[in-house]
Amino acid sequence: MKFGEVLKGKEAEGKEKHVPVIEVDKGAGKEVEIVRVIVGKEVPHPNTVDHHIAWLELYGVKKGGQVVSLGRVSFAPTYTDPNVGFQVPVGEFKAFCALAYCNIHGVWQNCMNVE
Ligand SMILES: [Fe+2]
């Protein structure tokens, strides 16, 4: 088995949504640029001790192709929802990719081109 076979995407979604949504705020008029990663933006994912999003990771793909691990956030079930902003120099990257881990439904992926 290859790791890529473990990662699920939009094609595997059921009624509960797991694919991490990536939003880029290039900071027009502000001093910072933020890449936001959200699971359950349209349909909230359950957030109980038995079933929750345990962590999110954000990766950036530089214009030359290098992949940079930009951050990882763990969540306390029932208290924190998976909605995180990372302060990132957006202009240095051509794409962002995120992973989200549900303790029941596994690891989910998404990528967004920013060029
Ligand atoms: Fe789930």
Image: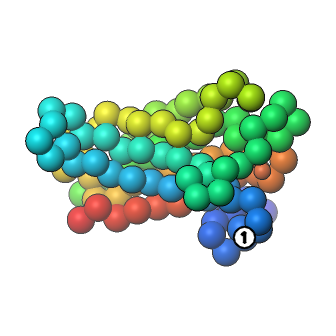
Mark 1 lies on residue: 12
Q: Is mark 1 within 8 Å of ligand 1?
A: no
Quadrant location of the C terminus? bottom left
In the picture as drawn, the residue positioned furthest to the left comes out as: 29
Which quadrant would residue 103 be assigned to in this image?
Answer: top right
Q: Quick check: can you spot residue 2?
A: no
Q: How is the image coloured?
A: rainbow
On screen, 1 above or below 35? below
Judged from the image, the secondary structure of the residue bearing numbered disc 1 is: helix
Pick the front one: 57 or 43 = 43
Which quadrant would residue 56 be assigned to in this image?
Answer: top right
On screen, 87 above or below 6? above
Residue 19 in the image, given as x and y percentages of width and height: 61, 58
Please, what is the three-letter code of the amino acid marked with disc 1? Ala
Which residue is depicted at the point 74% across and 29% down? 77
Pick the front one: 33 or 43 = 43
Residue 87 in the image, given as x and y percentages of width and height: 31, 34
Which residue is depicted at the point 70% across and 35% down? 54
Is residue 21 found left or right of 51 in the rendered image? Answer: left
Q: Quick check: can you spot residue 91?
A: yes
Residue 12 in the image, given as x and y percentages of width and height: 72, 70
Quadrant location of the N terminus? bottom right
Residue 81 in the image, given as x and y percentages of width and height: 62, 35
Pick the front one: 46 or 11 = 46
In the picture as drawn, the residue positioned furthest to the right comes out as: 50
* Crowd around label 1: few <14 · some 14–19 · many ≥20 (10 Å): few
